[in-house]
Image: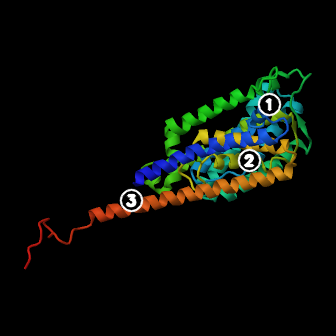
Amino acid sequence: MQASEGKKSLNLQKVFAPAALVILYIFFALVGRNFFSTATAIQILESSYYIGLMAIGVTFVIITGGIDLSIGTVMMCSALIGGVAYTNWGWPFWATLLLVPFIGLCFGTLNGYMVAKWKLPPFIATLGTMMVSQGLGSIISGVRTMYYPTIGSPDVWFREYFFKAKGLPVGALYLAVFFILGMFILNKTRFGRYNFAIGSNEEAARLSGVRVDRYKILIYAACGLFAGIAGIFYGATYTTIIPGKGNGEELNAIAAVVIGGTSMSGGSGTMSGTLIGVLIMSTLKRGLSSVGLQAHWQTFFTGLVVIGAVLLDNARNRAALRAKTRAVASQAVLEAPDPDRNPAGQPQQPS
């Protein structure tokens, strides 16, 4: 009975996010202005690039039961310093493309050390990194806006290779490749297995021989690396990097992960669910715009969706806990001694 309940809960979890995406798209196609079009579909994909990359990285972190609030400002800081290297320092653009993810990797590694070695709560550690990265980007850029190559620039190939070429959203190919890579790492490697083990029961993972601190550092470093890669795609999408920005972008990525079914309490999650969550966030953003709602309404409804996803996650966790409790109770009843038998297992003789 308990096994069937657990299987039913898992199937509902897998179906919920795709069904929500389809319903959302149909709804906006019916009530939105010019929503059901190829142009809108391309816009949904284009707005998914950098959010999707951040979401891949933070999925690993959330599965451990942690959080990374710095990915938005780390992404912006990486892109901003890359713009400084290209514009002010005279770096060749290929070197800039290596610098941007490296900066994200450094911030992610710092987060990992603070959480794993210095035992800071992930919320506090990454909140501090969020402010540090936001300030560092402004300091290095001199609080000046930086620009990435656009039409007419010798490095115009940048946007064609990473954003759009001849009207085709080539960035979607990169996003798909990175999601497939994330799925492979999470489901087919030791890194992924230990990721789930740490999130399910960190102390049990430690006692079984997993070097928990080492893997936590690697997990946060991977999250920072993906935030840095997201900085490249942010630069390709907008070409203009403004100092002091980035706050709030991390919430879009975290919301996508939660909507996709990854549990905030750790121990469960999928990359495919995260991808669906990213598309839901992008569809919601474009759809609300198509019905004439301004940005603050978009933020309001996005918050409601996130709250609903967290409530669903809590309900799923409570159902799983009840099923586990009933299974333990049933096992205890089966193993309890029979009062009608003596210690040797023979029936008691009436006196």
Question: Residue drawn at (74%, 37%), measured in percent from left and top?
Answer: 48
Mark 2 and mark 1 lie on one chain; the one further toward the N terminus is 1
Classify 10 Å Cα crowding around label 3: few (below 14), some (14-19), many (20 and above): some
Classify 10 Å Cα crowding around label 2: few (below 14), some (14-19), many (20 and above): many
Q: Residue furthest bottom?
A: 351
Task: Give the percent coordinates (x, y) of residue 246.
Answer: 81, 47
At mark 2, the secondary structure is helix
Look at the numbered discs 2 and 1 and tell me whether their residues touch, using CB distance below 8 Å.
no
Compute the Cα span from label 3 to label 2.
38 Å
Residue 37 in view:
yes
> In the visual, does 307 lie left or right of 188?
right
Classify 10 Å Cα crowding around label 1: few (below 14), some (14-19), many (20 and above): few
The amino acid type found where label 1 is placed reads Ser
Examine the rendered structure and indicate whether residue 39 appears above or below residue 273: above
Circle 2 sits on which residue?
A: 252
Look at the numbered discs 3 and 2 and tell me whether their residues touch, using CB distance below 8 Å.
no
In this rendering, which labeled residue sits more in front, label 2 or label 1?
1
Identify the colour scheme used.
Answer: rainbow
Task: Give the percent coordinates (x, y) of residue 311.
Answer: 63, 58
Compute the Cα span from label 3 to label 1.
51 Å
Question: Residue drawn at (32%, 64%), measured in percent from left and top?
Answer: 332
Circle 3 sits on which residue?
A: 327
Residue 105 in view:
no
Examine the rendered structure and indicate whether residue 42 appears above or below residue 6: above
Task: Give the percent coordinates (x, y) of residue 337.
Answer: 23, 68
Circle 1 sits on which residue?
A: 37
Residue nearer the viewer, 141 or 343: 343
